[in-house]
Image (cartoon, grey):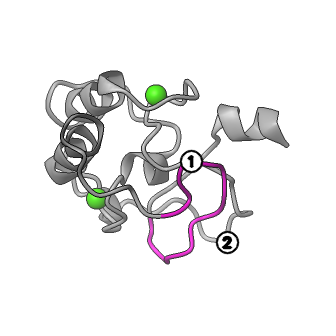
Amino acid sequence: MGVDIGAHEAGGCERAKIMFARGDVNADGKRDVADAVSVLQFLFSGGQTPLCLKAADTNDSGRVNVADAIYLLSFIFAHGARPPAPFPGCGIDLTLDELPCESFLPCMAAE
Ligand SMILES: [Ca+2]
Ligand SMILES: [Ca+2]
């Protein structure tokens, strides 16, 4: 399976805006090295597709690739740039992209 997520159609009609928190790839309510690992496993070793790929797009480029894992690791360990909104709290994606976000449990619980 390819990694060009942007080419994957998520459905014909516009989906309801799902609240999510960028960078929490594995949706466990915190951002740590496990989130970067989740991105890398998804991309390179057949790992589970994150339910909310928008959360995995840590640099808000509209695509999920290795740069997102690097961006997140840089933020966590090297005081790198913060992920774009919605961050650190829950919110909707402010920039248009085609990444799907089926559900994001930590934000559903917060509502
Ligand atoms: Ca996490
Ligand atoms: Ca990205």
Check disc 2 and give the amino acid type.
Glu
Which residue is painted at 52% across and 63% down in the image?
Answer: 85
Within the magenta stretch, is there residue 91?
A: yes
Look at mark 1 in the image and give the residue it sits on.
21
* The N terminus lies in quadrant: top left
Helix, strand or loop under label 1: loop
In which quadrant of the rendered view does residue 106 lie? top right
Badge 1 or badge 2: first in the primary sequence: 2
- Relative placement, left or right, of 27 versus 106 is left
State the residue in front, 66 or 46.
66
- Relative placement, left or right, of 81 versus 31 is left
Label 2 C-beta lies within 8 Å of the nearest ligand 2 atom: no
- Relative placement, left or right, of 87 versus 50 is right
Within the magenta stretch, is there residue 97?
A: yes
In which quadrant of the rendered view does residue 34 lie? top left
Look at mark 2 in the image and give the residue it sits on.
14
85 shown above or below 39: below
In which quadrant of the rendered view does residue 77 lie? top left
75 shown above or below 105: below
Helix, strand or loop under label 2: loop
1 shown above or below 99: above
Check disc 1 and give the amino acid type.
Ala
Q: From which residue to which does the magenta span run?
A: 85-98
